[in-house]
């Protein structure tokens, strides 16, 4: 079912808040890692990286927030995540969700086993998730951005660029609310 890009922000905000509350941690102890994944040389596959770059420009550094551009091999950043010690890792990546280009959606970590099309990266997200979940004892989720094109040598399509900007605004407000 296709949905309008303008209707994803409230369901995503609700999903993020439900997940945060499910961690059963006071806001002042939550350690969040936002990890942008993708290959910016493959069109819209770089969307997750552009979201994290936007967050880095808009948010001041904070001891309980890690903004990480992991590229197409996020497994290379497990040491950085281990040192940070997050309670929650939120991956941001292009994902085929059968929606309009630029649409954004919440993907529960447990659902990625049934969604092999979620990644073009070197290590399966399901395998990486099982490893990190056990290693870091943290919760994980994915924010997917529906790509329009993954062609080599292209930049972000206009639809995905708009989705990235809207997602950055939503995440900036959401992060500022729980950081205080």
Image (spheres, rainbow, N blue to C red):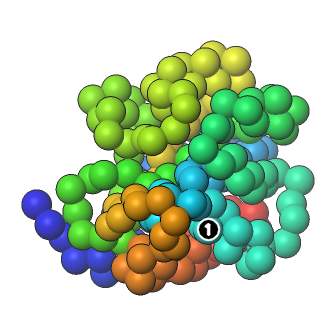
**Disc 1 designates what residue?**
50
Q: Is residue 127 above or below residue 170?
A: above
Badge 1 local density, few (<14 within 10 Å), some, or many (20+)? many
The reply to whether residue 3 is in sight is yes
* Horizontal and vertical percent position of residue 171: 58, 68
Q: In this orientation, does residue 27 appear?
A: no
Is the residue 79 above or below the residue 8 in the image? above
* Placement of 165 over or under 75, stated as above or below: below
- In the shown orientation, is residue 91 left or right of residue 108? right
Residue at image position (77%, 69%) is 56
Is residue 32 shown left or right of residue 146? right
Secondary structure found at label 1 = helix
Report the residue that reaches farthest toward the left: 1
In percent of the image, x 53 and y 80: which residue is there? Answer: 165
The C terminus lies in which quarter of the figure? Answer: bottom right
Q: Which residue is drawn at 52% across and 38% down?
A: 121
Given residues 101 and 138, the one toward you in this image is 101
Q: Quadrant of the N terminus?
A: bottom left
- The percent coordinates of residue 55 (x first, y second) are 69, 70
Q: Which residue lies furthest to the front in this view?
A: 153
């Amino acid at each position: 079912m296709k949905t309008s890009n303008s209707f994803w922000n409230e369901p995503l905000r609700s999903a993020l808040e439900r997940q945060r509350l499910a961690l059963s941690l006071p806001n002042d102890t939550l350690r969040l890692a936002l990890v942008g994944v993708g290959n910016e040389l493959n069109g819209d596959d770089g969307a997750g990286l552009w979201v994290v770059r936007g967050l880095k420009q808009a948010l001041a550094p904070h001891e309980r927030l890690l903004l990480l551009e992991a590229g197409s091999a996020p497994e290379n950043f497990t040491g950085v995540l281990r040192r940070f010690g997050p309670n929650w890792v939120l991956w941001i990546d292009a994902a085929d969700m059968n929606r309009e280009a630029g649409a954004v959606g919440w993907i529960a970590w447990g659902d990625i086993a049934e969604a092999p099309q979620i990644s073009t990266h070197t290590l399966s997200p399901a395998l990486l998730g099982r490893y990190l979940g056990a290693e870091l004892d943290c919760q994980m989720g994915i924010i997917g951005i529906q790509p329009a094109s993954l062609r080599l040598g292209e930049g972000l399509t206009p639809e995905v660029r708009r989705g990235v900007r809207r997602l950055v605004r939503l995440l900036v407000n959401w992060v500022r609310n729980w950081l205080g």
